[in-house]
Image: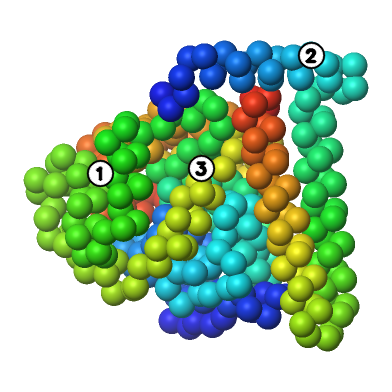
Amino acid sequence: MTSGTATGLDARTRLHWESAGTGDPVLLIHGLGLSGGAWWRTVDALAPSMRVITFDHRGIGQSASLTYAYTTEAMADDAVSILDALDIDRLHVYGFSLGGMVAQQLALRHPERVQSLVLGATHSGGRRARIPDSEVMAFFQRRARMPAEEAAWASVPFNYGPRSQAEQADRIAEDIERRLANPFNERAYRAQLLAASLHNCYGRLERISAPTLVVHGARDRIIPVANAHMSAERVPGAQLTILEDAGHLYPTEDPSVDKAIGAFFAAHG
Amino acid sequence: MAIMDEKFERAVDTVGTAVKTALVPWGGAEAWVDAYEAAIRAATDAQLNVARVIGVEPVRSFVASWADLTRDVGATHLSGARWILDV
């Protein structure tokens, strides 16, 4: 594995990236408040056949900047800074949750850089997006003030489906252990919440030209599955995979999905 | 959406419909929003190009940060406009 830092023109933005494996490159864009390290399961699954690049958003993990990223447009431009630093013109992109919103912006703002696109557990924003129930919304607001370990455990009922909570306690514990390895930045988290709130690509999804796969857990409480159906209908030619038993963090709950996503990238290499 | 009360939603619909109707003779609401987005990107890119040419700190950092601000304020306008107009 190699790692490095992409430096912004403002001389204060430093974006930490890591690269594992060789082959066609893929950029993984993670979700709310998480570092690039949260992709560890997917990196392990894809790196045997691909070059897998992860990074930390501004203010998260080892990345820093003068300001946090308050829009998904800013986060997409940061992702392009990573590609420029790595001298990669075009690659596969896989965004998860908030990262999926960033991936949509990347495909719309920089279509020449995106070979194919996977939108995992995400939504397109706008008035038609299906929002989570009030219990989930209240938790998001409360979470920023909770101690990291308490927040990680309190989020389990929202992040995972009922089957996983009953049968995969060890995998959930592994996730939390990894998550706690990185310090939680409350201000960056709030900035990312704002970015997610402002995100609005609904009207432009039909302009996405990259081959697209939409993946979603049917039991997702954080981003209801109706959003996946909506996105798949609007992105031209998009494929849709619904994981019947999975909740929001489906890569933990259904390990086979990473192989299917790898096959999608291989088919569009 | 559940977070909006019905009155507010109706008001937003009314405003959106009125603006869309008013803009029909000039190419439609979507074309205006797209043109605004293109203008924001052009302004942002121009400032970033200036920052690249300027080698002197802290001027370069200031111009680059201003470019980020232009993009993000513009993105916020665009998000709101698209939300109201539903485009």
Question: Please, is residue A150 above or below residue A126 in the view?
Answer: below
Q: Which chain is disc 2 placed on?
A: B
The quarter holding residue B25 reads top right
Q: Which chain is disc 1 placed on?
A: A
Q: Which chain is disc 3 placed on?
A: A
Label 2 to label 1, Cα distance in Å? 42 Å
Residue drawn at point x = 21 percent, y = 64 percent: A149
Element under disc 1: helix
Residue drawn at point x = 87 percent, y = 23 percent: B27
- If the image is split into quadrants, where does the C terminus of chain A sit? bottom right
Could you say which is closer to the camera, residue A153 or residue A163?
Answer: A153
Label 1 to label 3, Cα distance in Å? 18 Å
Visible residue check, residue A197: yes
- Residue type beneath disc 2: Thr
The image shows residue A89 at horizontal and vertical percentages of 69, 65
The residue that label 3 is drawn on is: A197
Mark 3 or mark 1, which is nearer the start of the sequence?
1
Question: Please, is residue A27 above or below residue A160 in the view?
Answer: below
- If the image is split into quadrants, where does the N terminus of chain A sit? bottom left
- Residue type beneath disc 3: Ser
The residue that label 1 is drawn on is: A158
Visible residue check, residue A17: no
Residue drawn at point x = 83 percent, y = 16 percent: B22
The residue that label 2 is drawn on is: B21
On the same chain, marks 2 and 3? The answer is no
